[in-house]
Image: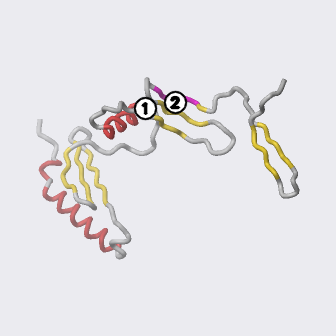
């Protein structure tokens, strides 16, 4: 009775044939991290490059698929540890393309994010000083906001 083998057949220049059979060990190539009915987050297992993969699906009649997928990503990655601190939530004091300032009354914290595009500003030191002046103006305007409320 003939048997079928999965694999790769390579024919070399000297008409030499080389067959490599696929190996099936019965071990899953995926380590599931999180899953729900229609989506899952898993880590691939193997000898070469291991990766994390997020597979998400949305209903065809979903009114806002982008928001749906963002919610799925948030839900499935909730348990993953992150070294990066999440963006501060609070009152947005200033928002431009290059400067963002947020104040949280709850944690009494200010977060300032500066962005300098090197192609647009080759003299990045000058741009940094300009952004720091804008930041200082924002702090001066919002001094009363930063004060601790009196009991």
| Residue 76 marker | 1
Q: Which element type, helix, strand or loop, lies under badge 1?
A: helix
Q: Position of residue 106 (x, y in %)?
A: 23, 38
Q: Tell me where residue 96 sits by quadrant.
A: bottom left
Horizontal relation, residue 149 to residue 118: left or right: left
Residue most extreme to the bottom: 123
Horizontal relation, residue 75 to residue 102: left or right: right
In the foreground, 82 or 40: 40
Residue drawn at the location 11% of the way across and 35% of the way down: 151
Q: Is residue 106 above or below residue 37?
A: below
Residue drawn at the location 14% of the way across and 48% of the way down: 145
Q: Tell me where residue 49 sits by quadrant.
A: top right
> In which quadrant is the N terminus drawn?
top right
Q: Position of residue 94 (x, y in %)?
A: 19, 55
* CB within 8 Å, label 2 to label 1: yes
Q: Position of residue 118 (x, y in %)?
A: 38, 70
In the foreground, 90 or 148: 90
Q: Which element type, helix, strand or loop, lies under badge 2?
A: strand
In the foreground, 121 or 7: 7
| Residue 33 marker | 2
Precedes in sequence: disc 2 or disc 1: 2
Residue drawn at the location 34% of the way across and 65% of the way down: 116
Helix, strand or loop: magenta stretch: strand
| Residue 5 marker | none
Q: Callout 2: few (<14), some (14-19), or many (20+) C-alpha neighbours within 10 Å?
A: some
Q: Position of residue 132 (x, y in %)?
A: 26, 65
Q: Is residue 39 above or below residue 14?
A: above
Mark 2–mark 1 distance (CA, rounded to whole Å): 8 Å
Residue drawn at the location 74% of the way across and 35% of the way down: 6
Q: Is residue 79 magenta?
A: no
Q: Point out the stretch of residues depicted in magenta.
A: 31-35
């Amino acid at each position: 009775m003939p048997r079928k083998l999965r694999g790769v057949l390579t024919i070399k220049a000297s008409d030499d044939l080389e067959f490599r059979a696929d190996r099936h060990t019965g071990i899953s190539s995926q380590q599931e991290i999180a899953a729900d009915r229609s989506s899952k987050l898993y880590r691939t297992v193997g000898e070469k490059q291991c990766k994390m993969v997020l597979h998400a699906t949305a209903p065809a009649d979903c009114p806002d698929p982008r928001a749906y997928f963002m919610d799925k990503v948030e839900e499935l990655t909730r348990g993953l540890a992150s070294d990066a601190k999440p963006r501060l939530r609070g009152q947005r004091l200033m928002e431009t393309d290059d400067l963002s300032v947020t104040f949280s009354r709850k944690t009494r914290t200010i977060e300032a994010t500066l962005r300098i595009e090197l192609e647009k500003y080759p003299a990045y030191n000058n741009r940094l000083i300009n952004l720091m002046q804008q930041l200082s103006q924002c702090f001066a305007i919002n001094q009363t906001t930063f004060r601790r409320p009196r009991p």
